[in-house]
Amino acid sequence: MMILSTEADGEQHAEAVARVRSLVEDAGGTVDDVAEWGRRKIAYPVRKQADGVYVIITCQTTPEVIDEIGRVLSISKDLVLRAMPFRLTETELAAVRANGVPEPVDERPEREDRPRGDRRRGGGGGGRRRER
């Protein structure tokens, strides 16, 4: 999985995907699926960016190639915010081959606005400290 900068254009995103694809295929591996999830909010800001373009590349290759992909992607820091490899089980890989990468699901409940308590009334840590 790669999280790409939203400040870069689509052509630069395509070049990053093509570079990963060529590294995998040149080493004798196969690229099974490329899923672009588009622009999404990142859990925490990375290099002062709150959003990123998510791209998931499913491939079969050797650990050495995965290390090389990580090295190559870390060089282009202004394009690639994060690159994280995941190892899939055989059943997960078969599901990706049959259906592609599933879209992300946000299972968190919608946050309801809670009335905030009056800060002046008890329950805080305010007040004087007792000396011991």
Image (tube, rainbow, N blue to C red):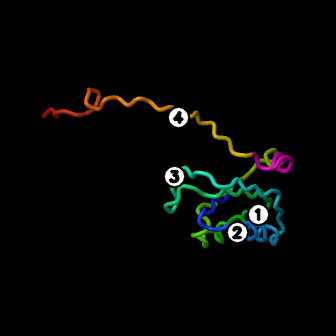
- Disc 1, SS: loop
Q: Report the magenta stretch's main SS.
A: helix
**The quarter of the displayed image where residue 110 is located:** top right
Q: In the image, which is nearer the foreground, mark 2 or mark 1?
A: 2
Residue on which disc 2 sits: 16
Q: What's the residue type where badge 4 is placed?
A: Arg
> Which circle, 4 or 2, is nearer the viewer?
4
User: What is the spatial separation of the Cα atoms under label 3 and label 2, in whole angstroms?
Assistant: 23 Å
- The residues tagged by marks 3 and 1 sit, at their Cα atoms, a distance apart of 31 Å
Q: CA distance from mark 4 to mark 2?
A: 36 Å
Dot 4 crowding, Cα within 10 Å, few <14, some 14–19, many 20+: few
Q: Magenta stretch?
A: 94-102
64, 51: nearer the viewer: 51
- Category of crowding for the residue at label 1, using alpha-carbon neighbours closer than 10 angstroms: few (below 14), some (14–19), many (at least 20): few
Pinpoint residue 12: horizontal percent, then vertical percent: 68, 70
CB under 8 Å between callouts 3 and 2?
no
The image shows residue 29 at horizontal and vertical percentages of 82, 65
N-terminal-most mark, 2 or 1: 2
Q: Name the residue that disc number 4 marks.
A: 111
> Residue 44 bears which disc, if any?
3
